[in-house]
Image (cartoon, coloured by chain):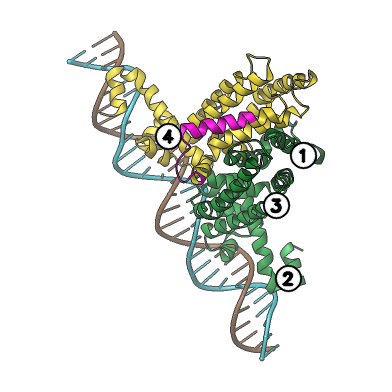
Chain colours: A green, B yellow, C brown, D cyan
Amino acid sequence: MTKVERAIKSNSKASIRQEKEKIILKAAESVFAEYGFRGATTSMIAERAKIPKANLHYYFPTKQALYRQVVDNIFNIWLQAADSFDDCDDPVEALTRYIEKKMDISRENPMGSKVWANEIIRRAPVIQDYLETTLKDWTESRVSIIQRWIDQGRINPVDPHYLLYMIWSTTQHYADFNHQIETLNGGTPLSDKQYQTAKDNAIEIILKGIGAR
Amino acid sequence: MTKVERAIKSNSKASIRQEKEKIILKAAESVFAEYGFRGATTSMIAERAKIPKANLHYYFPTKQALYRQVVDNIFNIWLQAADSFDDCDDPVEALTRYIEKKMDISRENPMGSKVWANEIIRRAPVIQDYLETTLKDWTESRVSIIQRWIDQGRINPVDPHYLLYMIWSTTQHYADFNHQIETLNGGTPLSDKQYQTAKDNAIEIILKGIGAR
DNA sequence: CGTTAATTTGACCAAATGGTCAGGATTTTA
DNA sequence: TAAAATCCTGACCATTTGGTCAAATTAACG
């Protein structure tokens, strides 16, 4: 009995679409992550989702539409992490939380991060509007917060932009380059303990690096 | 008079191959950077090199061969940066030099960095052997050096691997994600001055972060 | 039930793809 | 200058690609 068959059993037609879209999106995410938009093929995605290609096109009429959906989901996850920066006015706590959250996302959703990386490398044909609006606004507001910390003498004077880039790159590296890290780790993925150490090290170096602790 | 025509003038048949291969490789690098191996097409590369596709296939019989050549060139650049880590036993100077060199490479050769990123994201189908031999050996030897610094109390105890990953990610981010950075910078690339600041910030935060200064 | 609506899929298509090739142009060499 | 070697390219080809469609299957509902 397949997942879909089980879905049919449990809730039938109503949930079959929901269930299948989820399966397709997951398959699509991993194929887009690995090959980028152009390099990905709808038959690869269909194969990975274990459905005929024609069925895939029943749910998502075009490759574009499917890709768009995948990217939207990723952006929502990104926004989740963004929230963890709020909530707190203390630089140590705010940055610790943010870095932790981003590291967790890299571990739990590496494919999403890779799709994002591919998008940016291709000069963001699909998400350019996000970058210019949501991302830009969020960044500017965070830059202000960090600048205030600097003005208050709570952290050293560094350009907040480059601090953010450092956090983004360091954390996302564990998703985008996990294959390289795995290879250097003797061919096995980082254990939970190793990953915790990586996380601690990242937080430690960055916080100490800006004189926050 | 085209570049090639000039090449013919200056040295003729002997250098024409050399000259054209360079043009093709440069075009190929930028297309592979943008679309990955699968997503790139030989006609796109030919178009960007301003030659007929058949001519491209005269110099590089297959897309694979062309890609291999591009990746080899990039790896050589990588090795260049690797050298700058040697020469010196002082952590501050060695790391400063290394980070500087990597930042310079990101600025001067962003396409190469992107091809590398694509390769890793694709699980290194072409360069896996490099990762397991050259990169692994280099990394292990650098890890030993860093560990010695720690044992000597010259820097704080951090896992050297994660320190290296941080350096790689931070520096390469300025190449791989330069479009995002540009967008957040108001649509214009970082000026030389801004780039210098980014470089200084990266060095400052990392060195202070590990207690080296 | 039986009718309607949603889902599934094999067969198909036009366009794009990596690559070939014959024959022409240019340069080198004897 | 002749012929050998290298370089160039329009036309071509088999395969792959994104996407369609009609017909079949399954579920929903009165």
- Density class for disc 1 (Cα within 10 Å; few <14, some 14-19, many ≥20) is some
Q: Nearer the viewer, residue A146 or C1?
A: A146
- Density class for disc 3 (Cα within 10 Å; few <14, some 14-19, many ≥20) is some
Q: Nearer the viewer, mark 2 or mark 4?
A: 4
Circles 2 and 4: CB atoms closer than 8 Å: no
Q: Nearer the viewer, residue A86 or A8?
A: A86
Kindly identify which residue carries mark 1: A195
CA gap, disc 2 and disc 4: 51 Å
Tag 3 and tag 4 share a subunit? no
- Density class for disc 4 (Cα within 10 Å; few <14, some 14-19, many ≥20) is many
Chain containing the residue with disc 4:
B
Amino acid identity at mark 1: Tyr
Query: What's the magenta region?
Result: B184-204
Secondary structure, magenta segment, majority class? helix
Kindly identify which residue carries mark 2: A8
CA gap, disc 2 and disc 3: 38 Å
Q: Nearer the viewer, mark 2 or mark 3?
A: 3
Kindly identify which residue carries mark 4: B27
